[in-house]
Amino acid sequence: MKAVRLLVLAATLGLPLTATFHPIAVVNSPVLAADPPVAGDAPAPKIDVHIGNGPVWYANPVLLAVGGIGVLVLVLVIALAARGGGTTIIKE
């Protein structure tokens, strides 16, 4: 029961560290109509940016969370196994 309490406490203390707050965009006035194109405007150049396929495995937050939970479960199992137990004798 102490291990469960410790796990809940650790999760509760860790929650504020995972929260991210994004400000809400404020629009001063709505756009009623788009400006008509001017005859001398050139088409916008095509921009193609390739950064990669995403984060590498050791920077992926999902894998870090799964690995962290796995380590916590492993420590919990080792702690419970280390406590040991007495011999259970069943009398008939």
Image (tube, rainbow, N blue to C red):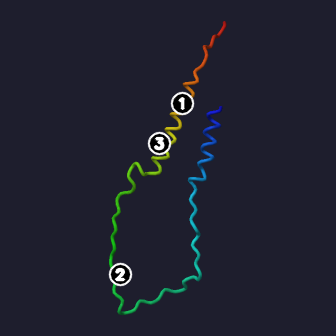
Across and down, in percent, residue 28 comes to 59, 81
Of residues 89 and 59, the one nearer the viewer is: 59
- Residue type of the residue flagged with mark 1: Val
Quarter of the image where the C terminus is located: top right
Callout 2: few (<14), some (14-19), or many (20+) C-alpha neighbours within 10 Å? Answer: few
Q: Is residue 45 above or below residue 40?
A: above
Q: Which residue is mark 3?
A: 67
Across and down, in percent, residue 82 comes to 55, 24
Q: Earlier in the sequence, mark 3 or mark 2?
A: 2
- Residue type of the residue flagged with mark 2: Ala
Which labelled disc corresponds to residue 44? Answer: 2
Q: Earlier in the sequence, mark 1 or mark 3?
A: 3
Find numbered disc 3 in the image and state the secondary structure of the residue it sits on: helix
Residue drawn where x is 52% and y is 33% of the image? 75
- Residue type of the residue flagged with mark 3: Gly
* Mark 3 and mark 2 residues within 8 Å of each other at the beta carbon: no
Residue 87: quarter of image:
top right
Tell us which disc is closer to us: 2 or 1: 1
Residue drawn where x is 39% and y is 49% of the image? 57
Of residues 36 and 53, the one nearer the viewer is: 53
Residue drawn where x is 60% and y is 44% of the image? 11
Q: Is residue 34 above or below residue 89?
A: below
Quarter of the image where the N terminus is located: top right
Mark 3 and mark 2: Cα distance apart in space: 46 Å
Which labelled disc corresponds to residue 77? Answer: 1
Find numbered disc 2 in the image and state the secondary structure of the residue it sits on: loop
